[in-house]
Amino acid sequence: MPVRASPGVQSLERAIAILNSFSMVQPERGVGELSRELQLHKSTVSRLMAALERGGLLDRDPDTQRYRLGIHILVLAAQVAGFLDLQEVARPFLKALSVEFRESVNLVVLDLPSPGTGQSAQVVNVEQFVPLARQVKDIGRVGRRMSSHATAAGKVLLASLAAEIMPEALPTHLQAFTPATIVDRDHFLEELALVRQQGYALAREELEEGLNAVAAPIYDHSGHVVAAVSAAGPAYRVTPDTLSHLAERLVEVAAEISQLLGYLRPEKNIPTMEE
């Protein structure tokens, strides 16, 4: 027996079909023609198109009453284009760093939860380069979602958030993954203040025992942190002295990537671990 979609899902699928009906050949569509094309009742199409108009995804010509794609489509498309540009710009830097460091190097973004869901922010690796000779089991593969409070990249990305967003992004009770995970909220907020001050973040065996990491922020043309570049490796190789060098290089490279994304920052000395 076939599974029927719920009314909500069915409406969503119909709305998607309406949006997909627009093209360069057919930039404007009317309710009647779409009703016939999609084999839906005219009132159903009218209701869905009105909802899409309220959401800014469609615009209606007051004279012809025909619809065309709305300006908010461009806003959404610009976000996707910017994200793809970020990966394209960062990719050669990540590859070069992985060769230089001989460790795993990642491009990481923050996934914020919807307000009121009770979920906390997670980080997602969207690019990764690992030298073949230095493969380490379970180092955040591409697509892996990780708790932001236990990772260097997560600390960098959380530290960039406005204060009013933090309650939704950070849970009251922080999960302990290892004995080194920071689980006290006040302590963690102090850690974020330190990250903002020094311009990079460290994670010493906080997500996985025996794994250390460092990360630095990447800014876009508007001055917002859009991603983090991170390096990670086993603690017996990525020692405190090694972390000092990695931090300085990551800050330098993140600044180069940011500049190519249109970000201008004042010249300043790159802090070291001892400062």
Image (cartoon, helix red, strand yellow):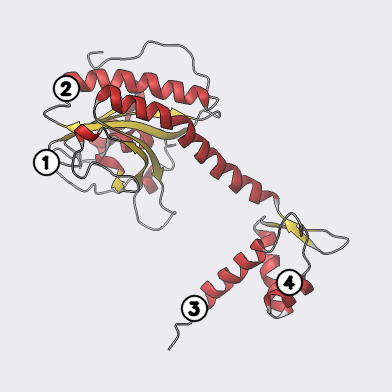
Q: Which amino acid type corresponds to the residue marked 2 in the rendered image? A: Pro
Q: Earlier in the sequence, mark 3 or mark 1?
A: 3
Where is residue 225 shown, x and y percent of the image?
A: 45, 32
Would residue 211 appear left or right of 107 to someone viewing this image? left
Which residue has dot 4 on it?
Answer: 34
Separation of residues labelled 4 and 1 (CA atoms) = 60 Å
The answer, for residue 231, to whether it is visible in the render is yes
Spatial CA span between label 1 and label 2 = 18 Å
In the figure, 230 relative to 143: above or below? Answer: above
Residue 57 rendering spot, x and y as whole percentages: 66, 56
Q: In the rendered image, which residue does mark 3 sit on?
A: 5
Q: Nearer the viewer, residue 56 or 197?
A: 56
In this view, the mark in front (4 or 1): 4
Amino acid at pointer 3:
Ala
Residue at 32% x, 15% y is 271
Q: Are marks 1 and 2 in contact (CB under 8 Å)?
A: no
Q: CA distance from mark 4 to mark 2?
A: 64 Å
Secondary structure beneath dot 4 equals helix
Disc on res. 117:
none
Residue 212 higher or lower than 252, as above or below:
below
